Amino acid sequence: MNTIIVFYQQTALMFHNMESVTNVMEYEILAKERLPKMIYDYYASGAEDQWTLQENRNAFSKILFRPRILVDVSNIDTTTSVLGYKISMPIMVAPTAMQKMAHPEGECATARATSAAGTIMTLSSWGTSSVEEVASTGPGIRFFQLYVYKDRNVVMQLVKRAERAGFKAIALTVDTPRLGRREADIKNRFVLPPNLSLKNFEGLDLGKIDKTDDSGLASYVAGQVDQSLSWKDVKWLQTITHLPILLKGVLTAEDARLAVESGAAGIIVSNHGARQLDYAPATVMALEEVVKAVQGRLPVFLDGGIRRGTDVFKALALGASGVFIGRPVVFSLAVDGEAGVRKVLQMLHDEFELTMALSGCLSIKEISRSHITTPWDPLRITPRL
């Protein structure tokens, strides 16, 4: 086992209160102690051999810094804009399903914490709180993640409800025509606890995930989600909403170019938290290929494996306009509710700001490719002075 993980497991045993949590990884260890096995495994596991799950993290360790020194870093500005909305930092909340399995306040607690942090929350289609409930928590910039169901009337209703509730963009998941093989869910016969429902679908008789001999979610997806989803549907979606559409799940230059042609407003480089196709590359390894392909024509974001402020800086140095975090949100939510999510966002902000200072960057626009080195860089020859 990774020695870093062992170290965090040992230190987690010494915690007596949440004040002693000093980094994002520690929340996962605490959440594992608190959550029922079926729920923890649902949040934590990846597809098949879970190679990509490990690689999403390990890949960041292969990217090293080239810090610039003797720069006046007494004033650091972490703010940025995403789709025209100013946010406190380029760290946003990814869509994660069924958050009330982690905490009774679920997505509403996450919404309040994200808004307090001054950044963007993405609500999952499969939330255990509805778009209306999340909107009622107060002001905030929110995106809505969309799965396209076979019944397009369901999709149209969902999108219209998100618009009415003040959501600012649609994040269309494009990597899930079928659900990846998540063996932990199969072993546990995963099912949504009976006191919960997929709130956005409750009135449509699509809110329950039934128990099966397999993963209940896999059976639900096979029955409801449209396997025929294609580029023409991206065009169709633009005819039913005025909201900008982000494509979540792009990993190649070819699809990045098609995304530009399709009229997408942005790309999220994602492998679905390593829960779909195992042996897909770590997202940070696929990022630069996608960035180069779009040639600045639309913003590129990244999710997958972000656990440190240093990870955020590395993604931005490779051309990302921002990152999304998923598991750190549900694990901190499980441990300490809204306060836990607030703390995760604050820790990542503070680590990121420190990384900027120690790299000699005063603002987001100063973070450049020259601030990092990667295994695939050509040999750097230092000029003689």
Image: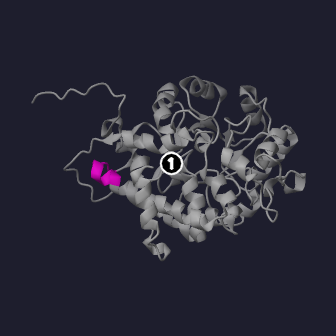
| Crowd rating for badge 1 (residues with CA inside 10 Å; few <14, some 14–19, many 20+) | some
| Disc 1: which residue | 81
* Residue at the spot 35% in from the left edge and 36% down from the top edge: 369
Instruction: Give the x, y percent position of residue 313.
Output: 40, 46
Q: What residue span does the magenta drawing correspond to?
A: 355-362
Instruction: Give the x, y percent position of residue 105.
Output: 69, 68
User: Disc 1 marks which amino acid?
Assistant: Ser
| Number of numbered discs visible in the structure rendering | 1
User: In the image, is residue 47 above or below residue 121?
Assistant: above
Query: In the image, is 74 to the left or to the right of 170?
Result: left
* Residue at the spot 87% in from the left edge and 41% down from the top edge: 153
Q: Nearer the viewer, residue 118 or 314?
A: 314
Instruction: Give the x, y percent position of residue 120.
Output: 58, 54
Query: In the image, is 100 to the left or to the right of 377?
Result: right
Q: Nearer the viewer, residue 17 or 187?
A: 187
User: In the image, is residue 275 above or below residue 36?
Assistant: above
Q: Is residue 222 visible?
A: yes
- Label 1's element? strand
Q: Residue 285 lies in magenta, yes or no?
A: no
